[in-house]
Image (cartoon, rainbow, N blue to C red):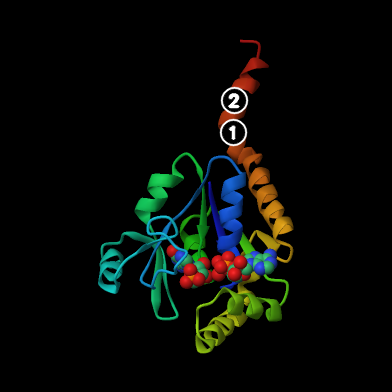
Amino acid sequence: MLFIISGPSGCGKSTLVQRVIKKVDNLQFSVSHTTRDKRKSEKEGKDYYFVSKSEFKQMIDDDRMVEWTLFHGHYYGTSRREIEKKGAGDTLLLDIDVNGAEQIKSKLKKAVFIFILPPSFEELKRRLEARGPETAVYIEERLDVARKDIRAYPQFDFIVINDDLEKAVRSLECIIHGMRCSLESRKKEIMPILRSFSGD
Ligand code: ADP
Ligand code: 5GP
């Protein structure tokens, strides 16, 4: 099962995803490719696969990306390999921008779309400034994109407001557990139970 976690930059997507992965069984993180520089706290292959622009463009030309976007001059994308490798048996979480979520929506109809909202615009700004080390211009650009991104919320299945972090983590956990109980997800598991009632 694929869960698409999206929302404006700085709303807390990666913080939430990291927390939820530690708490819920059989959850994996889809590691994206990017051409932006690595932040100090990040690890190659864990947070992102850091590649050059020419490598990334080659992947697009070879049709190796399920979706990709150009965000503030840097490429970001989800490779087919990542989805095939990790998506088969487990639940996979994708942390991607709104543009990428729209591309996935047209290709993978069964994915579950979750939109993360910060409690306010002012708090989003505060979080972006506190996270660093981006420049003021860079933060303004992200806030401009956020104003547009926010309009995409009606296309999502679930909304999580990331005000109190622990509450938001719990909401995400509930959505995942709830979707795992859907008829579609339970089909295989319930067959032997149903058969046991048939008297054969
Ligand atoms: P995104 O992945 O959406 O760009 P991050 O997860 O990097 O956002 O979060 C942006 C900043 O906000 C980080 O410094 C993070 O620690 C902080 N943050 C995330 N969630 C909360 C929250 N609920 N309350 C306060 N700060 C938060
Ligand atoms: P950051 O530079 O803060 O790590 O990420 C910037 C934005 O790119 C975030 O909104 C994040 O969700 C998005 N992003 C990260 N990986 C991908 C990806 O593979 N595809 C798309 N479309 N967006 C991504």
Q: Is residue 69 left or right of residue 181?
A: left
Q: Quick check: 184 above or below 62?
A: above
Residue assigned mark 2:
191
- What is the quadrant of residue 34 in the picture? bottom left
Q: Which is nearer the eye, 109 or 57?
A: 57
Residue at horizontal 52%, vertical 65%? Answer: 101
Q: Secondary structure at mark 2?
A: helix
Looking at the image, can residue 99 be seen? no
- What is the quadrant of residue 156 in the picture? bottom right
Q: Secondary structure at mark 1?
A: helix
Residue type at mark 1: give it: Lys
- What is the quadrant of residue 45 in the picture? bottom left
Q: Which is nearer the eye, 24 or 185?
A: 24
Residue type at mark 2: give it: Met
The quarter of the image holding the C terminus is top right
Q: Quick check: 144 above or below 43?
A: below
Residue assigned mark 1:
187
Q: Is residue 85 left or right of residue 101?
A: left
Q: Percent position (x, y) of residue 20? A: 61, 51
**Could you tell me how far apart the alpha carbons at marks 2 and 1 are, in whole angstroms?**
7 Å
Q: Categorize mark 2 by other alpha carbons within 10 Å: few (<14), some (14-19), many (20+).
A: few
Kindly check if marks 2 and 1 are in contact, taking CB atoms under 8 A apart as contact: yes
Q: Percent position (x, y) of residue 85? A: 38, 46
